[in-house]
Image (cartoon, rainbow, N blue to C red):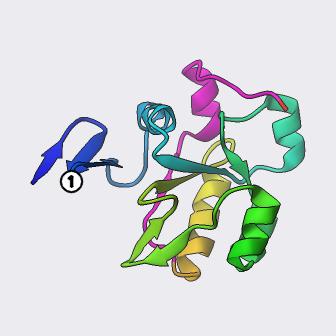
Amino acid sequence: MQTKLKWMTILRGRIFPRFSPGGVTFDDVKAGIENKNVTVIDVRNPEELTNTGKIPGAINVPLPSIKSAFELSDSEFKERFGINKPTTEDNSVIVHCDNSVIVHCLTGKRAASAIEILKGLGYLNLKLYSGSFSDWQKNNGPIEKL
């Protein structure tokens, strides 16, 4: 049995994020973070994160290194980024038991490029936060300072 709520789907007693086609909103990202059922990848350069902070819990994988990072072995990825590497399985990105992966940058352009690169590596169920960090700031989302 499947039950749909505004931002999630409950299927067989498990909660999955449910996003609108084409991307996710501030509310989607915030709810996913609060419920610990998404992994957020920030593709901005490290200096940008140092200057502005980041979405809490986001993992920084800069766009220029996105391809090589996701080509690392599972153990190398975990050692470098501190999380399990997303894997492709049944045409979905599965991280930590069925979590979705949200990709963002400052305004969404680099994140869209990163998603295309990741799709080329076989990752098909990626979510674009098109408003990205600018939208996060505009909505007064919490910011983790580095």
Identify the residue at horizontal 43%, vertical 44% (top origin).
24
Instruction: Identify the residue at image location x=21%, y=37%.
Output: 5
Q: Residue at x 90, y 43 (%)?
A: 47
- Name the one closer to the observer, 35 or 103: 35
Mark 1 neighbour density, 10 Å: few (under 14) some (14–19) many (20 or more): few
Q: Position of residue 41 (x, y in %)?
A: 64, 52
In the image: residue 138, left or right of residue 60 = left
The location of residue 16, given as percent across then percent down, is: 33, 50
Picture quadrant where residue 28 is located: top left
Q: Which residue is mark 1?
A: 11
Image coordinates for residue 92, horizontal then vertical, percent: 41, 70
Asked if the stretch drawn in magenta spans residue 127, the answer is: yes
Query: Which percent across, then down, holds residue 49?
Result: 81, 39
Nearest to the observer: residue 77 or residue 48? 77
Magenta segment: 123-145
Q: 74 above or below 59?
A: below
Label 1 residue SS: strand
Q: Is residue 88 above or below residue 77?
A: below
**Number of numbered discs overlaid on the protein picture:** 1
Q: Quadrant of the N terminus?
A: bottom left
Q: What amino acid type is highlighted by mark number 1? A: Leu
Please tell me which residue is depicted at 63% across the width and 67% down the height of the picture.
85
* 6 is within the stretch colored magenta: no
Up-down: is 29 above or below 96?
above
Of the 4 image quadrants, the one containing the C terminus is top right
Location of residue 53 with respect to 119 vertically, above or below: above
In this rendering, would 11 be left or right of 39?
A: left
| Viewer can see residue 16 | yes
Can residue 62 be seen here?
no
